Amino acid sequence: MSRISILTQQYRIKNLEDWTIRAILAEAFFLPIFPTVAEAAIVVGLGAWFLRSYVDKNFKMRSLPFDLPIAIFVFLGAVSVLMSPASSWSLLYEYCWAIGIFSLTYLLVGQNIRKPEQVALLINAFAASALVVVLVGFFQYVFGIDVAEMKWADGEAYPELRKYIFSTMEAPNVLAGFLNVMICLALGILAKIDDNKRKMLIAAAILIMAMCLAMTYSRGAFLAIAAVFLVYGIFQDWRALILFAAVTGIVIYKDPTFIDRLLALFTVTTNSNEGLRVGIWVSTIAMIADHPFIGIGYGAFKFIYPQYNYYLADPSVIVRHAHNLYLNVAAEIGIAGALAYFWYFFGTMFTALSLNSNARYKKIKNIAAKSKFTEEVSKLFMESKFLQEVTRTKTAWTARMADWSEKVVEWFSANSEEQNEAPKKKSKREQDLVHHEEMKWDKKSGKKSDKKSDDDDKMDIQRFAGENYDEDDEELIFDPKELKKFRAKKFISGVKFGIGLAFLSMSVNGMSDDLLFNVPSSILMWQLGALCAAIILMED
């Protein structure tokens, strides 16, 4: 093959790769805005991916972490439709369309996102989409919405409710679920990056999205994001609790209706929405008892529910889902199918929330245990993710308290001469001005070049290791040329952590409302699950 032919083939491969990634980005951006455009982007992406696989012989399919439970879920879902009491061509079509979109989205994202820069582009697409959604939501809040004829508004119980926003979504609860996911992604990235300017920008974005979330008046979504902030504040950064409390206080002060609706969630009466949901749950449990193995059929809830309508006597009321993620999945595809589905769901969540599997990252984490007692406890409970998080939090707080104590001593110290003799702390800009020629390291010997002092060497290593730096550990030596890669890994780790928080939010919210019944919300969930799987393969 001539050189020109090789270059032409490489150009075609690169072009097809770009088109595939663009399709993935278009799906992520248009999903909450124009779902039809997002679905068309899936088709374009699949075509580009197929052509690339045909042209590029080196591009191979790879095994993703949760292929097995997904395959079981898809298979049992098909069986449930074929054996459903409400079996019909429309039900089969709905299954093929919905599950087809979900599984193809998972494959498209999981098989083609293979570089850190592609992950960054996808996160930017999510951020741009969230910006549009939030702006539309604020517009609705400012100019008001007539909710009298909206089926999801309780106008009789709350006649003063006139700003029940839903932005580009079909209902406020769906918007709230989307905002929860975006807030969780932002929190995960905020926990890992070091750039203070970016941290302030992300914190501001979280604040704005949290305010928009409050405008939806979604009780379940609020409790879900409260659980996320609680976990994040305990194990990552206590300031998140202050931020959440501040936003909640502002919203309650500006609009007392919000707290009234939140308290109504814990008051179940026969005429309330909460009482209706309890009645639906009772009926759903009866469905599971009658069809425990193969379920009533994927998507058949609205057809079968009238047979179990123990609570409502009005046949005109159509109940499309169980308002509970766990009961709805078990009722439609059976207990075995539900186990496979939640194997993927919670497997992704726990994997995303676990510690980074990178060997060097583990080395840094192990250095944090300096005392003999801590070392023994770490060895004994090495597999306990919870205790690892507790140990890391304890180490972080110890470092902070030591830093605060040192500042207090310096402040009240009477010995000014010692303070003047203390070396001046370099600014962040001075620390960042490291010349390229001064960053030459011998990878084989692990020694620095002669152009740098010992203090500069320790400073570079400490910037990588952070608070877990131990200058007595001679093995902890980094190549400064890997600085960019290290920061990219931290960003990727933040995205993975954010995905774990997003799945945590969906799992809590799923106890009171099955938001994944909505197709765009489910597509978003499968996108994030595939992205998590791709990140896991990057780390390995």
Image (spheres, helix red, strand yellow):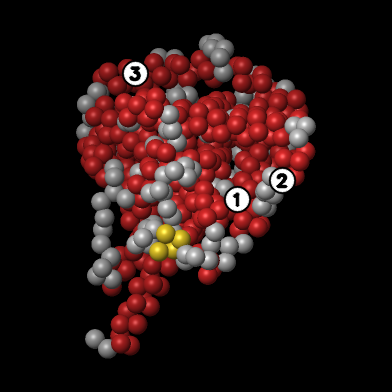
Look at 34% across and 62% down and name the residue there: 444
- Give the residue type that dot 3 points to: Ile
Viewer-side label of 3, 2:
2
Q: CA distance from mark 1 to mark 3?
A: 50 Å
Counting from the top left corner in percent of width and height, residue 81 is at 26, 37
Disc 2 target residue: 421
Circle number at residue 164: none
Counting from the top left corner in percent of width and height, residue 124 is at 54, 55
Counting from the top left corner in percent of width and height, residue 172 is at 58, 35
Q: Secondary structure at mark 3?
A: helix
Quadrant of the frame with the N terminus: bottom left
Look at 37% across and 29% down and name the residue there: 375
Circle number at residue 195: 1
Q: CA distance from mark 1 to mark 2?
A: 30 Å
Counting from the top left corner in percent of width and height, residue 512 is at 48, 24
Q: Secondary structure at mark 2?
A: helix
User: Is residue 445 visible in the rendered structure shown here?
Assistant: yes
Picture layout, residue 378 above or below residue 62: above
Q: Are marks 3 and 2 in contact (CB under 8 Å)?
A: no
**Numbered marks: total:** 3
User: Is residue 232 visible in the rendered structure shown here?
Assistant: no
Q: Are marks 1 and 3 in contact (CB under 8 Å)?
A: no
Circle number at residue 285: 3
